Image (cartoon, helix red, strand yellow):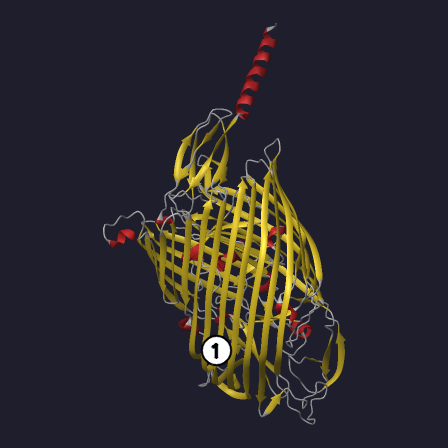
Amino acid sequence: MGFDKKILLFLIFTFSYLFSFAQESAVLYGKVSDENGDPLLLATIAALNNTEIGTSSDSEGNYELKIKANTKYDIQIRYIGYKPQSFRISLKPNTRRELNIKLESDLKNLPSIEITDSEGKRNNITRINPKTITDIPTISGGIEDILPSLGGVSKNNELSSQYNVRGGNYDENLIYVNDFEIYRPQLVRSSQQEGLSFINSDLVRSIEFSAGGFPAKFGDKLSSVLDIQYKKPIKFGGSVILGILGQSAHVEGTAAKKKIQFIGGFRRKSFSKLLNTLDTKGQYDPEFIDFQGFINYDINPKWQMSVLGYFGNNTYKFIPENRSTKFGTTNEAYQFNVFYEGNELDKYKTLFGGWSTSFKPNKNLDLKLILSGYQSTESESFDILGQYYLGELEKNMGDENFGKAKELFGIGGELKHARNRLFVDVFNIQHKGSYKYNNHKIQWGIKYQYESISDRIGEYNMIDSSNYSIPSNSIDLINPITLHPKLYLYRSLHSRINLNSNRITAFAQNTLEFEDDKGSKYQVNFGLRGGYWDVNKEFFITPRANFSYKPNWERNVKFNFAAGLYYQPPFYKELRNMEGIINKDVKAQKSWQLSTGVEYNFQMFNRPFKMVGEAYYKGLWDINPYSIENVQIRYFGNNNGKGFAKGIDFRINGEFVSGLESYVSVSLLDTKEEIKDSDYYEYFDDFGNIVHRGNGFSGKAFDSLLVHPGYLRRPSDQLITASFFFQDNLPINPTYKVHLKLVFGSRLPTDVPNVPRAASDAAGYTIPPYRRIDIGFSKIIIGEQKKHKSVLRHIKSMSLNFEVFNLFNIVNVVSYDWVRSVDGRIYGIPNYLTGRQFNLRLITRF
């Protein structure tokens, strides 16, 4: 063999060896848990000297990390709120090494929120870390306040726990706690009456949320699902939170040699100081309390049983005294003053009990039986008389009366009366199961539900302006001259409704996970839901599918796609129209949905970050149109609409400051609807100007034109929403921290009572943008790193939080009161949300 051939063979052998060596790899795997052995979901496992190598732990704390063989790596395991651990690893080719990690809690680096998941979200579900939700400066302190961080979710009312998702309303959101479906009160009109949400953040173990495209197992709503799981403690502990605006306490522990795990909590909220920042002054006496508890009993390794109980009593007492509201523009500034007589008393009492048992005969089969009962007793009682006057403010800065009313052009009164009672009973029984074989997971379920509704409505409004009761037939739209007057109530509802019904639903789905030869990972989920309700006699079947693809790239990227049909059968409220009459023929609202998104996990500053973008489209038909005032939704009571919702959601989150999670989310939305029989007339005066009922008259109406409005803005059509949360600490003393939250939502449409919906939309009536900045400061007084010999040794941690809500005292509008004069002109008097308020909380955990 010649010399050149020997060299060629040597080079081929050398490069082949080097290439095969470079391709050899090894696997590091194990479990991440806390000091108690509880698995840590979403812990980050990454190489400090190679930012492209990393993964995160799953719901059981398990992880698996592929690395190059014969290469030294500095592997760091991180979890927000725990001390990170680092190891130097070098593995031989084609080997697997188990490395189990227990992380110690670190109060100096408490988390606020972690919005990430295990290898990207599965089944279009995002997992959220609920730890230290108490650090977020919010009035309610509830889990719902972290949802806007995900994009596609908007909250335009700091007093309410309700939220809108991708153009939907509050009633389009599913909420589960330990597999039990949770309902919200039906009669609540304003957010200050709402009280506490069901979910107690002190008891929460895990949170999963989907803004759309969720799989078949999660139920029949058009917008979202929030799935909450409560803790199963392994040792005794608890917390006490004392604050100006509320107090709470919880205790957890085990019994019977840890076969029984229990957790329970008490909450009390009193917003009287906060409500005194509203324009309407008076004696506010809201009292919101609840108790709830969860007990789990491990009968044996294969069989367990659990019970969830809840009692909530929200009482809202109010004696209004007066109101002074300034509104308008620089050129047209007005002042609205009211003097009140009367009072209001609203009560919302809720009872819930749930029992479930699960049996796992082997590692692949899981069977579960669930029973639950929900009872709500709601009442509204008020008689309030308001005597008002409306005047124009002096705009001349040189005038001594600048800013004061110079001319009165509206004087009148309004009497509001209500005696409303609603009794709701819901009982259900369901079976759920799952079976694993190979890389398939099959899930199924069937549910029967009985509903009993008893509704007693008795309310009216009477408006009197300048000695004229409005409305009356003394005003004619075309020719406003005095006719033979007859007086009417402005609004009157009286009815007695009893409705008993039966509902059956079922689902089946299969999830397939596999990996190709190149190391790319796939997940496919396909499912069907079906249901029947004996009130409207409607039967439906809805297919849904989810697909995810994680290519074996150096960069940690994942692609998601979801499609399906989503039907929302009506509950009682959707059957009742504006006149308080129920229509039993109302069918399910329907939509087909498409969404696609990309997720990118990366390291920056040697810390984990995640960026997510998602686009979606929802085609809607059989819509049941509605109007909303404050938090009260009133439906048209028929399926006479169609529409769409489309948009883009974007968010980025990570440790901008080491050990502290921050985020930015921005969403764009466009949602419209077309309502049948929504044609209306526009009237023109002798100058050719359009005369709307909502805009007032400028002389006689000489001509008219029939308008076909087409697509209108839906009540939740908010073009831009943005949420920002940032945390920082003092480098020289990390026990001092600051938490800053900013929220923005662009204008929302609003309706004018007794004016056609299309006419209100054409006139451009909107609620101004929602803008709010809250800030909190916290000091860790006692941390786990400190050891005490006194009674303080039983305290795990203690911190003091000082919060400033609505830092810049920005005026936000939640709704309008509409005041009419006898000539038909209407004025929208804004109802403002809360002003600047301070809060102090002492948080103790043991």
Given the image, on which type of amino acid does mark 1 rest? Leu
Residue located farthest toward the top when viewing the structure as drawn: 1
Q: Which is nearer the eye, 746 or 128?
A: 128
Q: Quadrant of residue 773?
A: bottom left
Q: Which is nearer the eye, 5 or 298?
A: 298
Asked if residue 21 is positioned above or below residue 267 in the image, the reply reads: above
- Does 643 sit left or right of 612 as displayed? right
Please name the residue shown 59% across and 40% down the image. 436
Q: Residue 237 location, x and y as percent?
A: 36, 52
Q: Secondary structure at mark 1?
A: strand
Residue identified by numbered label 1: 345
Asked if residue 183 is positioned above or below residue 20 in the image, the reply reads: below
Please name the residue shown 65% across and 69% down the image. 575
Residue located farthest toward the bottom when viewing the structure as drawn: 484
Residue 479 seen in the figure: yes
Q: Residue 822 location, x and y as percent?
A: 62, 88
Q: Quadrant of residue 710?
A: bottom right
